[in-house]
Image: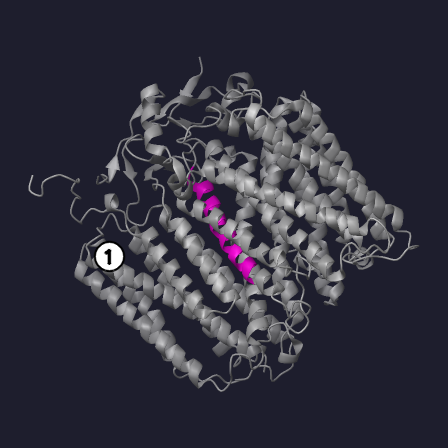
Amino acid sequence: MAEHALARPGQLAVGPIGRNGLGYWGVAMLIATEAALFGYLLFSYYYNGATQPPGWILEPAPKMFPAVPNTVLLLASSGVVWWGEKGIEAGRRGQALLGFGITFLMGAIFAAVQIYEWLIKPFGFAANSYSSLYFTTTAFHMAHVIAGLIILAALFGWTALDYFSPRRRIVVSAGVLYWHFVDVVWVFVFTTYYLTPYLGFGT
Amino acid sequence: MRQPAYRTPRIGESTPELRARLHAIWETAPGWRGWLSTVDHKEIGLRYIVTAFILLAVGGVEALVIRLQLAGPDLHLLTPEQYNQFFSTHGMTMIFLYALPILSGFSNYLWPLVLGSRDMAFPRLNAFSYWVYLAASIFLYSGFVIGAGPNDGWFNYVPFAEKDYNPGINEDVYALGMVLLGISTTVGAANFIVTAFKMRAPGMSINRLPILVWGTLTANVANLLVVPAVSLAFFLLWLDRQFGTGFYQPSAGGQPLLWQHLFWIFGHPWVYAIVLPAMGMVSDGLPVFCRRPLVGYSLVALGTVATMILGFGVWVHHMFATGLPALSLSFFSGASIIITFPSAIAVFAWLATIWTGRPVITTAFLFFASMILLFVIGGVSGFMTASVPVDWQLTDTYFVVAHIHYVLIGINVFPVVGATYFWFPKMTGRFLDERLGRWNFWTMFVGFNLGFLPMHLTGLLGMPRRVWTYPEGMGWDTLNLITSIGSFVFAIGVLIFFYNCWKSYRSGAPAGANPWDAPTLEWSIPSPPPPYNFAVIPTLASRHPLWEDRLDESEARSSLDRGMTLDEGKETIITTAMDAEPDRIVEMPEDSYAPLLLTIGLAVLFAGLLVKLWLVAGLGGVGCLAALLLWLWPRQEMRERSPEPRKIGEPAHG
């Protein structure tokens, strides 16, 4: 007589515990497809740039102020939001509120400075394909910053309502992961538009 | 009720009491409320299948009109502009609105059943994916019905798609509609990927996945990564058209070839995405009728994955005639030739399965087996054009049209119709009529080959594709007439198929749980399956749980009637990604209007963008946001800290 293989698990988690759960996978998928989207945006820039004569880049020496401090601000916000997440993990609600709140402010300042940069650019959206790509790519990033800010606001509100505990907090971890993505992808956008002209691309 | 964080699942038998309890938990509400809010993967899968078949019929009628126009030289049934819209809309419909959605439909319906789960990983996302597909189909067709359909071919090359040459609303509808459709495809892809890795019955380790799952999983990994390319391409086109940007315009420092790169970076993996799941259907269905397991399971699975990986690196073979550097041509030509190796593995596996099996000739078998022949013909003509000099000779001729139809009808439509004959009894509890089935198969098979085999010759004789009509005496007249006759014979075959579905759905012979004596999990449950799929979660001991006594590959037997009951809520099990060890109990979402509301928000947003009413678009955006918040609001029973909710009518101080 053959034996039946029967899964007889002991204690199993019910629903997500910590960051382990389907939702985290879902956000990872979202990030994968969005990362690909930014990949194609940057591909478009490099491909158009590589096939155009010099002079295509309308700002061959992009100003480092306020772009560099703004980049540092955005990257630093990743650390702050991580600290806020630690607050949830440790059951310290005040720390979490502070962390999400400050991250929100840093993100909002980044967005405001970026809008200021748009306003002082010497070229418009449709000046040539360089300017179109610059504005489109940074606007796509801006859309992600705004999505991230909405997520941060929701996390702040839900934390204030005391929805999360150290075990039941996947929403926080997933939202924080998304914010890290918003920050990391900016490094690629920044490198492409602000640094590669100095390395000789397109100039 | 608040859920405890940990629990030991009860093990039990599949009893009538348990089934009644699960039925009450999982059942969708009756009436329009349930219809609009259901998240049941079987319901969503069937909607996908029905919608895609309707669009197949619509696209087919367009094809017949085209074939009437081309039946003889110098015909004037259509004006050139109408002809452009007909062939573009035909391509758009078949490639984007039929070919992938039909496979998503089958996979949606079948995945949880073959994986031993009670639903997909993200049931609401699944509903959302369908609603957006429906909305995008209506959106994309809204142009055609007012006489402003896409008119630049399904791959929509610039500069003709730009506003200077194409001032109507045609291309704006197409561009925005494709971005909308991309959302559906992308969320569907995410759902399939997570489901494949997490939502399997215990014991269904990665080397026991049905090939259908391998095919759909691989295709959707590709979709997740390449759909953004085409969405971006269309979005940039829309900006070019509406805001005077110059992404694709040389006069503004843009690059027309950027369109072709972005489109084909998506387009070629997409071709594999719309055949690999269908090949998976054949790999799972054909062996049942050969009364033996598939030959070379591991090789077929690995070949599927390898095909897709190489498939990312062949897109430039659509651009051989655009004057790219020789190095680039050599690389992509080499890759396009090498890709035949992994994709041919399945062919040999199927042949060996038939050869060493005891074939039972059913209609499903005929469709599956004939697909091998069509695949080889389509594969060889593709292999020919992978060679640069041959491609230069044949590009933009009817040879390429013949190739794409052998690939898409041969490797998509034939397996899909076969799969319908195979799985229809599971979905409805009734057989499709076998006698009509024979008529169905032979009319489709003869009609298809009569129509498309001579088309290779038409192409070799130099007839360019996409011409509205052609003069007499080019040597194309007879060939075109034969193709037109073949297309109508083929259409009759498809009509017989639809008639068979309709008739058998109402009065087909009843089928039991396992009418084909098939080996996999979906056949272990009643036909049609109950809302909860599996009364107890099965445990697998092999790849063929229902053939174990016969194959006797090992001592262990799968446990199908005894397992975790998971009846304390709308629950199923998730398992580890590779070995499928039980990992956690997961609470599935209840039916929800959020997916429909989000779709309505998106539709309003896109309609607003199309007519450039920014206020409307903004309202749509706000609607999306509200629907998303409703969707993502943390569930009460999953919170530990906020106070336990009181039942209605319970005193505040009990």
Q: What stretch is highlighted in magenta?
A: B176-199
Q: Is residue A59 left or right of residue A171?
A: right
Point 47% across, 69% down: residue: B613
Point 46% across, 37% down: residue: B43
x, y percentage for residue B540? 45, 27
- Residue at the right extreme? B473
**Which chain's residue wears label 1?**
A
x, y percentage for residue B599? 44, 53
The three-letter amino acid code for the residue at tag 1 is Trp
Magenta run includes residue A22: no
x, y percentage for residue B646? 15, 42
Quarter of the picture holding the C terminus of chain B: top left
Q: Is residue B355 visible?
A: yes
Quarter of the picture holding the N terminus of chain B: top left
Point 69% across, 68% down: residue: B160
- Which residue is identified by label 1? A158
Most prominent secondary structure in the magenta stretch?
helix
